[in-house]
Structure formats: structure tokens, C-alpha cells
Image: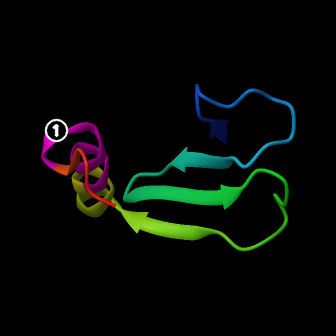
Amino acid sequence: MWFTSSYSNGSGGECVECSQTATGTLIRDSKRPEGPVLTVRGAAWTAFIEGVTSSRYEGRT
């Protein structure tokens, strides 16, 4: 099952969809669901989410 970010406003903006699998996360462009899908293993996805939600990356560009 695919889901969009809770920050998505539904007006066709830049957004991705994700789907959880037994081994990781699938990511695709919500405007092109038939297009390519990026597969990220579970540990890498967890590290990414923890990184972007932690304060250690504040102020970096």
C-alpha cells in the first residue's frame, strides 16, 4: 500500500509516495506512479529518518 507524506497538500506539488515492505521501503514520484521505484533497505531508511528528524543536521545545507 502506497502512502504520501502528511505534509503533502494534495494540489499536485512536489511529493513522493512510500510503501513499506518486509525488507525496506519503496519510494516513487506521486505524479508518475508508473515510473521508476527506489528501493531502500530497512536499516538505511531508519538511519535516514533518524538523521533528518534529529537536531544534528540543523543549519546544514
Q: Give the quadrant of the C terminus.
A: bottom left
Quarter holding the N terminus is top right
> Where in the figure is residue 23, as x and y percent of width and height?
37, 59
Residue 6 visible to an observer of this rendering:
yes
Outermost residue on the left side: it is 56
Q: Is residue 1 visible?
A: no
Residue 16: x %, y % from top left: 65, 50
Q: Position of residue 46 (x, y in %)?
A: 26, 50
Name the residue at 56% across, 70% down.
38
Q: Is residue 54 magenta?
A: yes
- 42 on left or right of 56: right
> Is residue 24 found left or right of 11 in the rendered image?
left
42 over 17 or under it: above or below: below
Which range is magenta? 48-56
Amino acid under disc 1: Ser
Residue 48 lies in quadrant: bottom left
Decide if residue 38 is on the left or right side of residue 35.
left
Is-magenta flag for residue 15?
Answer: no
Main secondary structure along the magenta-highlighted residues: helix
Residue 53, quarter of picture: top left
- Determine crowd level at label 1: few under 14, some 14-19, many 20+ residues with C-alpha closer than 10 A: few
Q: Position of residue 21 (x, y in %)?
A: 47, 51
Residue 29 vertical placement versus 1 (above, below): below
For residue 36, side relative to residue 57 (left or right):
right
- Name the residue rendered at 80%, 70% in the picture: 35
- Identified at 74% across, 26% down, the residue is 9
Viewer-proximal residue, 12 or 30? 12
Task: Look at mark 1 in the image and give the residue it sits on.
Answer: 55
Q: Residue furthest bottom?
A: 36
Seen at 57% across and 47% down, the residue is 19
Q: Between residue 51 and residue 24, name the one nearer to us.
A: 51
Which of these two is toward me, 51 or 28? 51
